Image (cartoon, rainbow, N blue to C red):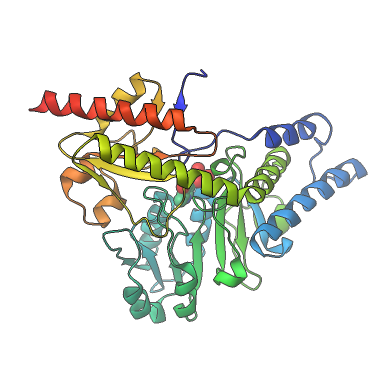
Amino acid sequence: MDDYIYMDNAATTKMCDGAIKEMMPYMKEYYANISSSYSFAKKCERKIEECRQQLADTIGAKSSEIIFNSGGTEGDNQAIGLIRGEGKRILVSIIEHKAVLKSCNKAKERGINIDYIPVDEEGYVDMDYIKGHAPDANMISVMLANNEVGVIEPVKEISAVKGGAILHCDAVAAYGHIPINVREMGIDIMNVSAHKFGGPKGTGFMYVKEGIDFAPMLVGGGQERLRRAGTVNTMSIAGMCRAATESIKNMQTRMEYERALRDIFIRKIIQDTDGVMINGGLKKRLSGNINVSFSGIDSVALIAFLDDHGICVSRASACDSNKESASHVLSAMKLSEERIRGSIRITLNYENTITQVMYVATTIKEGVERLRKMQS
Ligand SMILES: *Cc1c(COP(=O)(O)O)cnc(C)c1O
C-alpha cells in the first residue's frame, strides 16, 4: 500500500492525522444525536456549534450562515436548485464541475434559461460576457478554482458586476488551498467539501448569506434550522473542522512548497521530453496543479503505464475517468483534439517530495517515448 506515489490530490486527499484523531471521540464518547433533548445531546451539540463558528471564521461568515451537508455535489445541486420559476436565468461558466452543469440541465427542464460563460485559452472566464449578461441573470455560478486546470477565477470582479443576481461559487477545489473571505469577495452562496483538504469524505458545508431566499433540497427533520434535514454527521464535522484549521494555519508554507515542487516538475518534464504543453494559465492558479499534454499519445495509456509504476495521476476529473469522454474543460479552452487526448492532471500536496517528482518525471518520459514508438 505504501508503495503508491499519490499525485491526485484534486480527486481526494489523504486525511490529516489531526482530523482522524479529532473524529474518534465522536464515535466513542460524544455519539448522541444532537437533535435529542437531554443534556448529553446538548453537550455534543455545543461541540458541533463550536466547529460551525470556527469554520464560519475561516471564510469571514457568521455561524448562522453555515449549513453542514454531505459535500460538494450536494451543495452544488442545492444551490442551482434554488432558482425556480419559468423564464428565470442562470449564468454559468462552461468549465464548472459536472455537479453544477448537470444541475443546470435539470434547471433547464424546469423552464430556466441557462447562459454559458465562455473561457479563454488559459481557462479564465470571459468578463465581458459576464458584464453583458449579468443584468438578466437571477444567479451567476462561477467556481473559485477549477479542479482540472487549477486556474483561479476572478470571483471578486464578478461580484462587482453581478447586480441583483445571486453569486454562487463552487469553492470545493479552492478552500483550504487559497485564502477566502466571502464578504470581501462578495459571494452569496459557497460550497466546500472536506475530503479535498485532508478531511473525511461525504462531508462539507455550504455558506448561504443571510437574507438569501432558501428552500431546502432535503426535507424531514428540523436539523440545520430546517435548511438540511438528516441526522447531523458529528464525527465528520469535527474531522472537517480540524482539517480546515490545519490547512489554513499552514497555508502559506504549503503553497510555497507545492509551487516550488510544481515548478521543478514542469521544468524537468519540459527538459526531458519534447512535445510538452502546459494547459491552463499559470498566473492565477492553485499551487499544486499541473495539467500537461504530450503530443502524439493517448493519455489513457500513459496513465495505465504510470499506474504500473505505482503512480496515481488522472485525466480530467476523477468523476469522468471511467468514461472515455474528453475533458469538457479543455474542450471549452478550445485546445486541439490531440492536446486534449494527450493530457494528464497531476495534483501535488505537501507530502510529495523532490525524489518522487524526479522519479515521476523520468517515468513519464519513458512512458511517453514508449507510446510514441508504438504508434509510429
Ligand atoms: C470534488 C469536487 C466537487 C464534488 O465534491 P464532492 O464532495 O466529492 O461531492 C464539486 N466541485 C469541485 C470543483 C470539485 O473539485
Left or right placement of residue 91 versus residue 217 in this view: left
Dividing the picture into quadrants, the one containing residue 276 is top left
Q: Is residue 71 visible?
A: no
Name the residue at 63% across, 35% down: 16
Determine the residue positioned at 26% across, 57% down: 333
- Above or below: residue 86 compared with residue 250: below
Q: In this view, does 211 lie above or below 41?
A: below
Determine whether, in the image, residue 277 is placed left or right of residue 108.
left
Q: Residue at x 61, y 71 (%)?
A: 183
Q: Can residue 97 be seen in this view?
A: yes
- Residue located at (64% from left, 61% from top): 59
Q: How many labels does the image show?
A: 0
**Spot occupied by residue 207 in the image (x, y as percentages of width and height):** 61, 60
Q: In which quarter of the image is the C terminus?
A: top left
359 to 269, vertically: above or below: above
Residue 181: x and y in percent read 61, 65
Q: Where is residue 248 in the image (x, y as percent from the top left)?
A: 64, 51
**56 and 253: which one is in front?**
253
Task: Please state the horizontal and vertical placement of residue 190, each as a whole percent of the image.
Answer: 55, 60
Return the residue nearer the eye: 95 or 103: 95
- Please determine whether, in this image, residue 190 is positioned above or below residue 69: below
Relative horizontal placement of residue 269, taking residue 178 as reference (left or right): left
The furthest residue to the left: 376
The residue most toward the right is 39
Position of residue 129 in the picture relative to residue 241 (left or right): left
Q: Which of 27 and 18 is in front in this view?
A: 18
Residue 307, picture quadrant: top left
Looking at the picture, tell me which residue is in the foreground, 211 or 278.
278
Q: Quadrant of residue 199?
A: top right
